[in-house]
Image (cartoon, grey):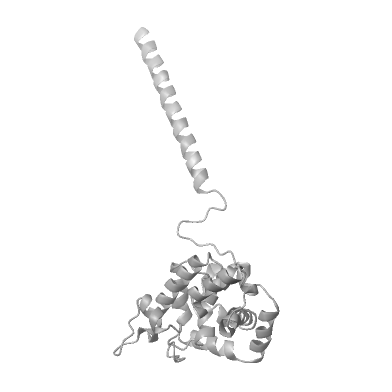
Amino acid sequence: MRNFSKSFLFLIQNCKRTLFKNIIFIFIFAILLSGCTKKGTIPKGARSYHNSEVWKQSNSRIVKYVDIYKKNKHVKTCLDRAKSRRYLYYIHRVFYKYELPPELAYLPILESCFDYKADSGSARGMWQFTKATAKDYGLDVSFLSDERLNWRKSTDSAARYLKILGERFENNWELALAGYNGGPNYMEKQIRSQRTRNFWKLKLRKETYEYVPKFLAMLRVAKSRYPELYFHGAPRAWVRSG
């Protein structure tokens, strides 16, 4: 009987230790599970879209071009070309990789109307690179080859260039876009001499002065009048974000 009592007591003590360990394990597991399922957590690798007000702003300079592009078919013609050749699927994928605003994927509406053979004399291709800028961003421009006309390669170069411009102008996309058109050195010189980083207050040469309001007007017309073309090939999360 004495041996039985000792065995029973040992069994109870052992059960208590096991139960205590299990309680601690369950408590730690609950904490970890709570952290993993916390509301608002963005899955690793996912991207959130903040819809910066820069793309939605309005002023008299933008409205002027909105009225123009509403009356002609330029925006629709460019978007039709992009859809028929599935350009935007690829462009959005590349721009997503470089974490660029999706709105920038539509810059060829202004630059070339999505014509990969476009030639303005000093610049060529869908993204209208000059020889110097093309070479700076890895495109071969020679007597035998001109990769500015390779829309896939030039898209990757354009993404890297826009990424650098965004960083250089601290994600002020009006200034970065003006830099894409007029050159970053020119823009920095104007910012220093005029002592303002507000694009809308800068006095610039005509083409660069009109470049940003034209592009923002094109975006507005594309989104409001041709949404099925505008969002064709775009990231679903961005489309849902409005």
User: Residue 134 versus residue 116: which sits nearer the camera?
Assistant: 134
Q: Is residue 133 left or right of residue 54?
A: left
Q: Quadrant of the C terminus?
A: bottom right
Residue extending farthest to the top is 2
Residue 79 shows up from this direction: yes
User: Residue 128 versus residue 32: which sits nearer the camera?
Assistant: 128
Q: Position of residue 199 (x, y in %)?
A: 61, 73
Residue extending farthest to the right is 60
User: Residue 234 versus residue 138: which sits nearer the camera?
Assistant: 138
User: Residue 5 versus residue 14: which sits nearer the camera?
Assistant: 14
Q: Position of residue 73 (x, y in %)?
A: 60, 91
Q: Position of residue 82 (x, y in %)?
A: 49, 85
Name the residue located 55 percent from the left edge and 77 percent from the top edge: 231
Locate residue 60: give its quadrant: bottom right
Where 52 sits versus 78, above or below?
above
Name the residue located 49 percent from the left edge and 44 percent from the top edge: 33
Residue extending farthest to the front is 193
Q: Position of residue 17 (x, y in %)?
A: 42, 23
Q: Is residue 165 left or right of residue 66?
A: left
Q: Is residue 97 left or right of residue 238?
A: left
Name the residue located 64 percent from the left edge and 83 percent from the top edge: 225
Name the residue located 54 percent from the left edge and 67 percent from the top edge: 237
Q: Quadrant of the N terminus?
A: top left
